[in-house]
Amino acid sequence: MNVNLHSQQQSDLVHAMYRVIDERDAQALGVFLDEKVVFQLGNFEPVRGRDRVIGANEAFFETIADMSHTIDDLWVHDHHTICAGSVLYTRLDATRLSIPFATILTMEKGQVIDYRVFADISEL
C-alpha cells in the first residue's frame, strides 16, 4: 500500500472504519460519523444525517453475506482523505464479486462530515 499523508491519525481512522464496515456493523460505523454527515454511494441520492446513514448501511449490509476491502492507496491532504482499492463481496447466494472502489472523506473535529464512495455495485 502506498501512503502519502500528513496525518497518521486520519490514516488510522480510515483503516479502523473499514474494519467495522467489513464486519458489517453499521452501529459501530456511526462512531466515526459526524451527526451532520452526508453519505453518497455511486449515483445513489445522498443520505444526510448520522442516523440515516447508519440505516442506509444496515439496509445495504442485509443484501450481502460478506465483504472485504483492500486499501491499496491512501492520501491525506488537510481534512480530506482519499483511499482506493478493491472490495470483495460475497452475495447471499455465496457467489463472489470483486470491484474497484475509491472513497473521499472530509473530516471535521475527528469525524467524517462528508463520505463519498465511488464503486459500481450494479452487479450485486
Image (cartoon, rainbow, N blue to C red):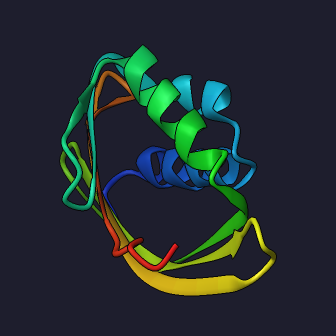
Q: Toward the viewer: 109 or 62? A: 62
- The relative height of residue 70 versus residue 12 in the rendered view (above or below) is below
Residue 77 appears left or right of 81: left
Snapshot quadrant of residue 17? top right
Q: Toward the viewer: 82 or 42? A: 42
Locate residue 76, reporting x and y percent: 29, 59
Residue 80 appears left or right of 13: left
Locate residue 59, reporting x and y percent: 55, 38
Q: Toward the viewer: 2 or 32? A: 32
- The relative height of residue 76 versus residue 55 in the rendered view (above or below) is below
Locate residue 118, reporting x and y percent: 28, 67
State the residue at coordinates (52%, 72%).
124
Residue 91 appears left or right of 114: right
Residue 10 in view: yes
Q: How many marks?
A: 0
Residue 2 in view: no
State the residue at coordinates (67%, 45%).
62
State the residue at coordinates (37%, 51%).
7
Snapshot quadrant of residue 36? top left
